[in-house]
Image: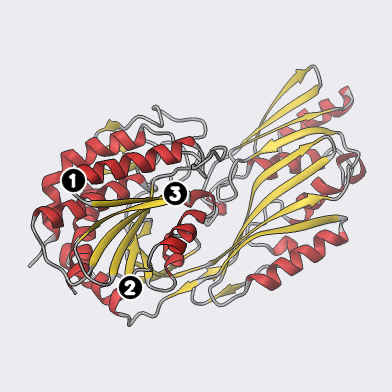
Amino acid sequence: MLFGTEILKYRDEILKDLADLIAVPSVRGEALPGKPFGEEPARALAMVLYKAQKMGLAVKNVDNYAGHAEYGSGNEAAAVAAHVDVVPAGEGWDSDPFTLTRKGNLYFGRGTADDKGAAVVALYCLKALKDAGVKGNRRLRVIFGSGEETGMEDLHYYFQKEEMPVMGFTPDSDYGICNREKGILRLNLLSKEKQPSVIKELEAGVVYNAVPDHARTVLSCSGQSADALKEAAKTAQGEFTFKSVPDGLQIVSKGKAAHAMQPQSGFNAAAALIRLLSSVFSPEELGAFCSFLDQSIGFCYDGSGIGVQQSDEQSGPLTLNLGILRLENGQAKAGIDIRYPVTSDGGPIFSEISRRAEEAGLSAELLEDGKPLYLPGDSKLISILQDSYACVTGKPAELYATGGGTYARAMKGNAVAFGPFFPDEPDRRLHNTNESIDIDRFMIHAQICLEAMYRMLTA
């Protein structure tokens, strides 16, 4: 029996509730009392839990870090984990990023693909199971996080208060089944003291896990240097605009955003701007910090410039992303996101970067070392998910590795990433402009999701 098709009757309701959730610009903001990720992520979490409560599901909000909706009874729980926070919208959208906008088969909006669409579908899967009166062998939860995009502190906190599921998945990646997730290393490179530089201020990026599509600097330089920069920009990698401002010369660098797990698919506006400046100014004029970034990171997305290039057969090569850059009043910070192979260790990688930074007169600050995830292919969960996928699509679900970091790793080896997108789908522009879902393809995902949840509940 295929239970997954039951979700199709809820298509219109799914789209309506998705529109409501997209309208909440749930980008992390300043922490407030009782709202660790700011006002809007808390509002999105409250909204989805309210919708669950109206469906007659048991709900719980765990201090606005995360919450869950639950169906069924039993001593143990299975879970689907999704998130309702989003990365900033960025520039260049063809429609309002916080209005669900239909164009043919596509629905556009920040969070449609990552991860509000999947969150709403998972909620309606619980409703479908409840409406059908399905009896299971355990409880089934949909966990909604509100801080996934900025470090996944949300689920780490949630699981300090709530039980760990015996099995689960997160629909926040691709099909088939991601049973290998690279380690995630996040760090800051910092200037130790104020350094003389032609740069008065420089800013790029807002999160570690995205390639910055915009960078801006203000320089204190001569007219001759300004002319040299404009001439160099004609043949440099990137797109630049120049403007005289009261404080000096402003340069804006335009790039292309991408997820940090695939930095090579974007174009780093910060790296391009530093490279342009390095082509005109000497290291003494530019300052040790930007000189180090240009020589040791630049456009080297594989870590080779800073001595940490590596790869393994199970998960592929290390990737490195310069996600955040701030320089002002002689103080500097660069935020780095590294995805390292599943057979590697983040400790030696950070040690090598720290050593090189110290040699250049800088310091390195470790923010996070999320250990890799590797779930064997013969596990019960893998079997359930493979059977669910095959029942809906008629095709096998292959096992694969990713550089992405998902909620699966927060569930201590009991979960994997599973869906919602298919290998033959075009780029859904995650973390970029014009993020979208193809509704027909997404409803195939919805059937797979319901079938997998049904089997986790009843297995």
Task: Give whichever of discs 2 and 1 has the lower sequence position.
Answer: 1
**For residue 166, which numbered disc appears in the image?**
2
How many residues crowd around disc 1 within 10 Å: few (fewer than 14), some, or many (20 or more)?
Answer: some
Cα distance in 3D space between marks 2 and 1? 25 Å
Q: Is residue 421 visible?
A: no
Q: CA distance from mark 1 to mark 3?
A: 22 Å
Disc 3 vs disc 2: which is toward the camera?
3
Is residue 150 left or right of 394 when viewed as pictured? right
Secondary structure of residue under mark 1: loop
Q: Which mark is residue 63?
A: 3
Where in the figure is residue 63, as x and y percent of width and height? Answer: 44, 49
- Viewer-proximal residue among 4 and 292: 4
Give the SS element for disc 3: loop
Quarter assignment of residue 242: top right
Q: Residue at x 45, y 50 (%)?
A: 65
Q: Is residue 170 left or right of residue 140?
A: right
Count of number-bearing discs: 3
Query: Where is mark 1, residue-wise?
Result: 55
Q: Under tag 2, what secondary structure?
A: loop
* Left or right: where 324 falls relative to 266: right
Q: Earlier in the sequence, mark 1 or mark 3?
A: 1
Can residue 276 be seen at all in this image of the molecule? yes
Amino acid beneath label 3: Asp
Q: Is residue 421 above or below residue 120?
A: below
Q: In the rendered structure, are the residues bearing label 3 and label 2 in contact, judged by CB atoms less than 8 Å apart?
A: no
Q: Where is the N terminus found, in terms of image quarters?
A: bottom left
Distance, label 3 to label 2, CA atoms, is 23 Å
- Mark 2 belongs to which amino acid? Val
- Nearer to us in this view, 25 or 53: 53
